[in-house]
Image: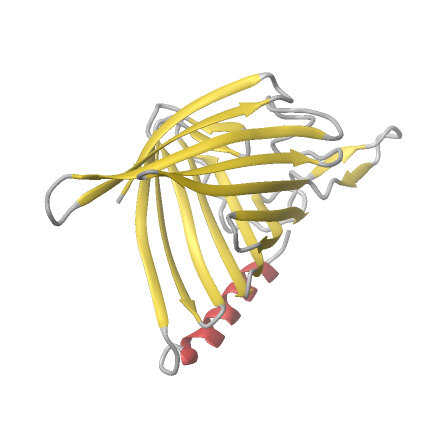
Amino acid sequence: MNKSCSILFITTMMFVAPLTSKAQVDYSLGADIVSSYIWRGSHCAGTSIQPSMGLSVGGFSIGTWGSVDVGGFGLKEVDLTLGYSIGGFSIGLSDYWWNGEEAYDYFRFKKDSSSHMLEVNLGYEFGFGLSLSWNTMVAGAQDKYPDDDGDIQRAFSTYIEAGYSFSIKSIDLTASLGFSPWKSDVMYTAGYAHATDGFAITNISLLASKEISITERFSLPVFTQLTFNPAKEDVFLVFGFSF
């Protein structure tokens, strides 16, 4: 991992900024509070606050998402994303950074010790509720494993997910199936408590969400997600709400 990721984000902002005066610009700002932080079928932290903000113009988008654990583990995460979409197709680049509360190493970009992980994201929405995404790690000190000869290899850890969204009365539902297609080393395989080896189904989930009216002018979006991780024989039930 090196400084090219940061340079890419800065360059993108320089490109997007002039467009904001000529095209429709959309901004987003919000936060979720969740009982547990579950990522792709794996437990990352306990009760967490997860703020986000983003900007999109034309088909381009840039944003940031974070998570701060308030359940006593002192874990934190800050992610940066770049994206472009056209029609139902989307392509993106995500920079993940997570560490303990006292780990002040965000600007450490050495390839053998950086806590950053760089992932390429591809997605397609078919227009009738069905979506498909492919996500592959391409850089990061943690995305490696020793082969049978003891040599360190790049894992190219990959997560593929299919989702289907639908509604029943006032409740919006999304069913998802996610898996790791081969041996990898980020969240799914050796070196982590969530480890599997080779092909593994890591996420079968159902997300239900609705808005609860508080006053005539204010409603609170709430959601519950049931997640099974067959690879680890684990299950999670998460509640959350959004602002």
Name the image quarter holding residue 220: top left
Q: Residue furthest right?
A: 149
Residue at 84% across, 30% down: 150
Left or right of 68? Residue 42 is: right
Q: Residue furthest front?
A: 169
Residue at 10% across, 46% down: 216
Residue 190 lies, in percent from the top left, at 69, 26
Q: Residue furthest bottom?
A: 22
Please determine whether, in this image, residue 26 is positioned above or below residue 150. Answer: below
Left or right of 241? Residue 6 is: right
Q: Quadrant of the C terminus?
A: top left
- In the foreground, 6 or 34: 34
Name the image quarter holding residue 53: bottom left
Residue 52 is at least partly visible in this image: yes
Residue 154 lies, in percent from the top left, at 75, 42
Exactly how many numbered labels are in the figure?
A: 0
Q: How is the image coloured?
A: secondary structure
- In the foreground, 227 or 140: 227
Residue 137 lies, in percent from the top left, at 65, 46
Residue 122 lies, in percent from the top left, at 62, 54
Residue 101 is at least partly visible in this image: no
Q: Residue furthest top?
A: 233
Residue at 66% across, 47% down: 136
Name the image quarter holding residue 162: top right
Left or right of 112? Residue 117 is: left
